[in-house]
Amino acid sequence: MPLRLDIKKKLTSRSERVKSVDLHPTEPWVLTGLYNGSVMLWDYDKQQLVKSFEVSSLPVRNARFIARKQWIVSSSDDLQIRVFNYNTMDKVAAFDAHTDYIRYLEVHPVLPIVLSCADDMTVKMWDWDKNWLCTQVFEGHGHYVMMAKFNPKDTNTFATASLDRTVRVWGLGSSHPHFTLEGHERGVNCVDYYPGGDKPYLISGSDDKTVKVWDYQTKTIVHTLDGHTHNLSDVLYHPRLPLIISACEDGAVRMWHSTTYRAESTLNYGMERAWCLAGLEGSNKMAIGYDEGSVVLRLGHDTPIVSMDATGKVIWANNNEIQTASLKGVVAELSLKDGERVPLPGRDLGSCDVFPQKLKHNANGRFVVICGDGEYIIYTSQQLRNKSFGSALDFAWSPTGTGDYVTRESSSKLTLFKNFAEAKTIKPAQCSAEGLFGGALVGVRGPDCIAFYDWDDLRFVRKIDASVKNVYWSDAGDLLVLASDASFYVLRYHRDAVTANLHAAGPDGVEGSFELLHEMSEKVGSGTWIGDCFLYVNATGRLNYYVGGEIMTVSHLPSKMYLLGYLPRENVVFLMDKAKHVTSFTLNVVLLEYQTAVVRRDFDAANAILPRLPSDQMDAVARFLESQGFKEEALQLSTDPDQRFDLAVQLAKLDVAKAIMMERAANDVHVSATDMQHKWKQLGDLALNDANYELAEECAIKADDLSLLLLLYTSKGDLSGLTRLAALATEKHRHNVAFIALLLLGRLRECTALLVETKRLPEAAFFARSYQPDQVGDVLGAWREDLALVSTRAAKALADPAKHEELFENWAASLNAAHLLEKERQVHAAAAEYPTRSPLLDMNVLEAMGAPTGGQHQAQVRHEDEAQCESAAEEADRLQQQVHAETEAQARAETEDQARAHAEAQARAQAEAQARAEAEAQARAQAEALVRAQAEAQARAEAAARAEAEAQARAAAEAQARVAAEAEAHARAEAEARAEAQARTEEEARAEAQARTEEEARAALEAQALAEVPATAGSTAVPPSPSNVLDFGLRSDEEIEFDDDDADWGDM
């Protein structure tokens, strides 16, 4: 059966041709080296570009993370290796590395070294602790070296792939290879080691379109994988899954089972040629680089294949190897704190015949099932002995029977086994079976629903329309959680109703089988029930538990973890991450029991449990009780002042809330003043709504809520309180409240002074005109001074009533009225006198003050002599108009005089300014002329001096040149004489030597002739011909054939 791999695309990025990819070991980053000379850093979780490095104008063929140094090392076709810090983006180093294109970089997993291989047929080792010194060169290949990989089991050795058709294995201590693997028919492009410890294998990919599996101990080919239609560009042993992955220039990425060598899957994302692959240790992530971009995939899930029984025994799978350990008593024995890693010394149980994708204990822990490759095998949990096996896509244990289980063989076939024997097979009619869950009922997941069946005879119980990813049943079987993509549903299962009505159930199942209790907007990663509390890990990395519709947080997890199980006797919950590191957290079971009793409304049990709760848990208990609606009980138990205050306010217990605030103000010196003011104001508003005016006033004073005090004092007619409020508001610079309080108190002079003090001068002037006319002069002077800073003309336009009384109607009467009312305001009437004094609000004071004697008698006389009054009024109007006209004429004349004087003064000022400017210009011209004359004189003197110096220098140079010429002529003559003498001597010596040579040659010829006279010639020697120099041992009709290994590498 094939591997069931859920392949999910994490990132697709379109870019230039990608020549290398690498995955960061801890961050969700993929590094891509591009043919355009850039290096891109992508976050595949967020699917966004993090950083970009412009490395070179030529192609970047390789880029690798050095995570322990926060570096990126890259190689490009300018023959340089560059190192960058990926946090600061600073360039750490750059140096020339090879004399030809650099094909690959390999970082040592432990040592501070990097291997580089290149087209110059060498591999070089660079040590970054020695300032990137080349510490060793490995030579031996006869063509381009395409890749180098360290052996994960022995990091002192590495393998290289070359276009000379070989794979060579080297050691760091020698510059010559240990041995050579030969078997490919064309150049080898890539190589990788098997990551496990059970096989001494490596793989290689070649231009002969095959992947070969080698045993590097026996130096033999184990298997050859065929199927690609073009050159292999990269191969990968997946670090976690039993897969061999190959990338080809035909665009296909093929996956092969590393044990059976069966073709599992082929990926083709339509991005042209596939160039590179990258895996990540301990993860299912994989990256692929193409001509048109890169892809990051998740093959299967990162969830560890592990199971823990009720006694704390853990069994997990490392590929096909099965290991076990016990967590019972470990936390107490080692005194581990919450969140500390639990040591897990594993014991090997053996190996499994299938690749495990699911592992689960049965109800009593005696057996364990391992599912994978479309099969299941049931083993004993102690010795891993085979008990049963079969074909199944899914498997679920019964919660009761030892050998009872259900298997899903296809989307239309469920089989029930009882005591390891097949009992019944059904075809689900309600939905196609895409998943299987155990528990109190058999759960069958469909495309958008889940159907439940009983364990006795697989009879249909109920279908629930919900997209479900997992199902979690409580131990009692009456509660269950349906976990979806973004939330989970808590349901109650009515077992009695199902038992009573199952035999008569219709096509829709048993009505009322389930009751929805709550829907919670949290994604469940993994979970388990503890009584009526559901403990789970959510998507944001928090360990939470659900109880009674509320979610409580146990801890924030440092990384993504999966819930392993809970040991009730030790009150410890265990979690495991994808690297199979176990962490423990202690749960307060007493608190869980109390919360469960409250949810069940079993208050007698809850009150019995309450004394067993530690005091530091009371606040958590109070918050839980508040969420359940028991606020009185929460107020009694809570010790948090903030929570107690909120509860007292919600319960309208204002005295209790006040006592809490007073106690906190006296004892907590670090309390926030703003927070205290907010709470006092909140309490004051509630007291006002409750008509508790004394408490409202006290709260307003403590909260500095002067607006509330103003409302209280004015509503009650509290004169002394209003007086205190005016002083307090003035002190705290709350001017609006202070003004209103002073106005209500009748302290008008202080109102005017307050307006002047706050620079509200126009308002102060009008206020004084209305209520305090005797203060208008003082306010007007201050207003005029302030306005003059902005506009003198506007300031002069302000009229003073003391000087221009005719411009202000009833000015004299206003002064008399203000004087009279000043005495009246000194008497403060009681609020009870308001009905008798209310008509005074409508009285016109000036009309009341208009008659000389005043009173009702004067009003009667005025009415009787109306004509006289009218004539007097007309005369007064005439006089007033005459005075007004004269005043206007006088004002106009004064204005004209002022304007004329201003114009004359302005003209004089302009004339003076013009004269001054002309004088300054004349002086400036004279000064400039003087400076110019001085400059010209100085320039002439400098020119004369320069000419004299040049003449002297010229004369000295000519004299020196003459002396040098004479000396050179003399020297030349001497040299010519010497050369002539030497030539003559050499000619004589050459002639003498030639004569001697000729004499010797003549003598030698004569001697040879004398020696050859008696000899006879026996044979004639034939000189060798050029055709006999190179002899390949070929027949005349044979041709020499050369295999072109370089036909396809030029485009790489």
Image (cartoon, rainbow, N blue to C red):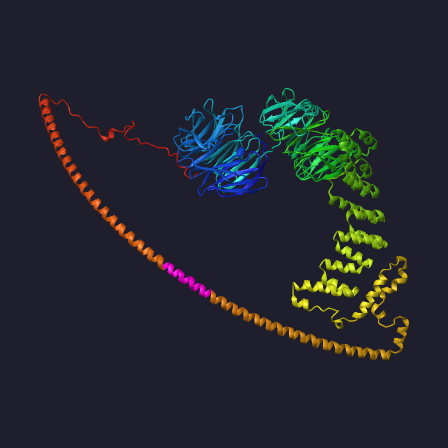
Asked if residue 193 is positioned above or below residue 672 in the image, the reply reads above
What residue is shown at x 68% (from left), y 64% (from top)?
787
In the rendered image, which quarter contains the C terminus?
A: top left
Q: Quadrant of residue 440?
A: top right
Front residue of 448 and 690: 690
Query: Does the stretch in magenta take in 932?
Result: yes
Front residue of 338 and 922: 922
Q: Quadrant of residue 545?
A: top right
Q: Position of residue 224 (x, y in %)?
A: 47, 28
Q: Quadrant of residue 354?
A: top right
Q: Is residue 643 visible?
A: no
Q: Position of residue 710 (x, y in %)?
A: 80, 53
What residue is shown at x 55% (from left), y 29% (from top)?
242
Front residue of 984 and 359: 984
Does residue 444 appear to the left or right of 52 in the view shown? right
Segment tinted magenta in the rendering: 924-939
Q: Main secondary structure of the magenta part?
A: helix
Front residue of 432 and 308: 308
Q: Is residue 745 visible?
A: yes
Q: Report the number of discs.
A: 0
Q: Position of residue 606 (x, y in %)?
A: 81, 31
Asked if residue 694 is positioned above or below residue 584 in the image, the reply reads below
Asked if residue 686 is positioned above or below residue 938 in the image, the reply reads above
In the rendered image, which quarter contains the N terminus?
A: top right
Query: Does the stretch in magenta take in 491?
Result: no
Q: Position of residue 779 (x, y in %)?
A: 73, 63
Asked if residue 649 is positioned above or below residue 186 in the image, the reply reads below
Does residue 620 appear to the left or right of 83 in the view shown? right
